[in-house]
Amino acid sequence: MILVRSGIVWLATVFLAAASASGHAASRPESPPGLDEIIQKAVACAQHSPSKERPARYTYTKASIIEQLDATGHVKERKEKVYQVSFRDGLTYARLVEVDGHAPARADLKKQAENEVNVRQLLGQNTPAGDNRESFLTPELVARFDFKLLDQDTINGRAAYRISFQPKIPGPPARHIVDRLLNRISGTLWIDAGEFEVARAQIQLGSEVDFLGGVIGCLKKLAFTITRTRLADGVWLNSDSSGDFEGRKLLDFLRIKTKSQSTNFRPLAQNSSGTQAAG
């Protein structure tokens, strides 16, 4: 999960990409499963969620704010964007529909397309469009970290297991920028006690990450939180996020704060021509 000068939005998007509830309250289990079982069930759920087992298709509105700050913490530039997002067959597609209260200019749309291509290339994704931000918990990702069960908590009225994580030492080889980031982040997961979906995640960067040996820049701070919403049919989607990123782009100080909220979740229904329409 708002244009600033060339390259800044791309950098912020990479940070966000490196990281992706209503309904009845779930009762707390009397005998909670062990840590390994919780993690295994969460990974299995992410890979075989209702959105994968059946053709879950949703659309919703995502409003985002990105602020660029100076070294003293004052806002230099603030942009607001609105996206119309569709979730189809496990992939998320975002269409920019508004920038600062107006229809996006051609330059806005071009920059958005460039950002999406850059992120997919850096993450090694071969899909022509869309991303898998809703299925970020994979066996490969989990294998990078050590976990610790802290306690039980409540997220949006539902019981959840609160679990901390930190990178294993030594970490796996860093073949991409995202690998270097993952080798240095830690945080907390809240896993729903009833359905083993990730209900919330918080991550932070433990140490500075250089890009191309520091030539093009570095990331000194990353703090990111995301919350997910359970829809009536059991599908979970990202709903709220906030981030704080600090670093350097070439010789320029760079600090970006982000915030996004998704609303108006509704099903996509197929019409008689086979195209998608909001239900």
Image (cartoon, rainbow, N blue to C red):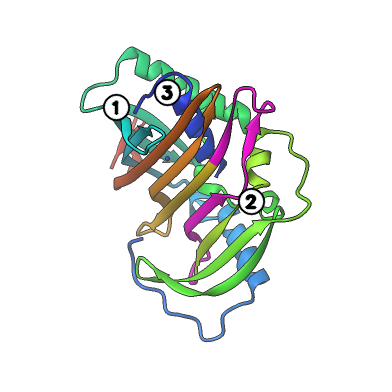
Estimate the x, y position of residue 153 in percent, counting from the top left. Answer: 44, 73
Estimate the x, y position of residue 209 in percent, counting from the top left. Answer: 63, 38
Task: Identify the residue position indicated by label 2 in the image.
Answer: 138
Image quadrant in which the N terminus is located: top left
Q: Is residue 88 above or below residue 112?
A: below
Inspect this view and state whether residue 130 appears: no
- Give the class, few, some or many, for how many residues have Cα within 10 Å of label 3's Cα (few <14, many ≥20): some
User: What secondary structure is marked by label 3?
Assistant: helix
Q: Is residue 128 above or below residue 91?
A: above
Image quadrant in which the C terminus is located: top left
The image's mark for residue 233 is none
Q: Nearer the viewer, residue 234 or 197?
A: 197
Is disc 2 in contact with disc 3, using a CB cutoff of under 8 Å?
A: no
Q: Is residue 20 left or right of residue 38?
A: left
Q: Nearer the viewer, residue 60 or 156?
A: 156
Task: Identify the residue position indicated by label 1 in the image.
Answer: 97
> In percent of the image, x 62 and y 46: which residue is there?
207
Estimate the x, y position of residue 147 in percent, counting from the top left. Answer: 65, 64
Task: Identify the residue position indicated by label 3 in the image.
Answer: 112
> In percent of the image, x 35 and y 43: which residue is there?
260
**Closer to us: mark 3 or mark 1?**
3
> In percent of the image, x 77 and y 46: which residue is there?
172
Membership of 139 in magenta stretch: no
CA gap between label 3 and label 1 equals 11 Å
| Residue stretch in magenta | 193-220
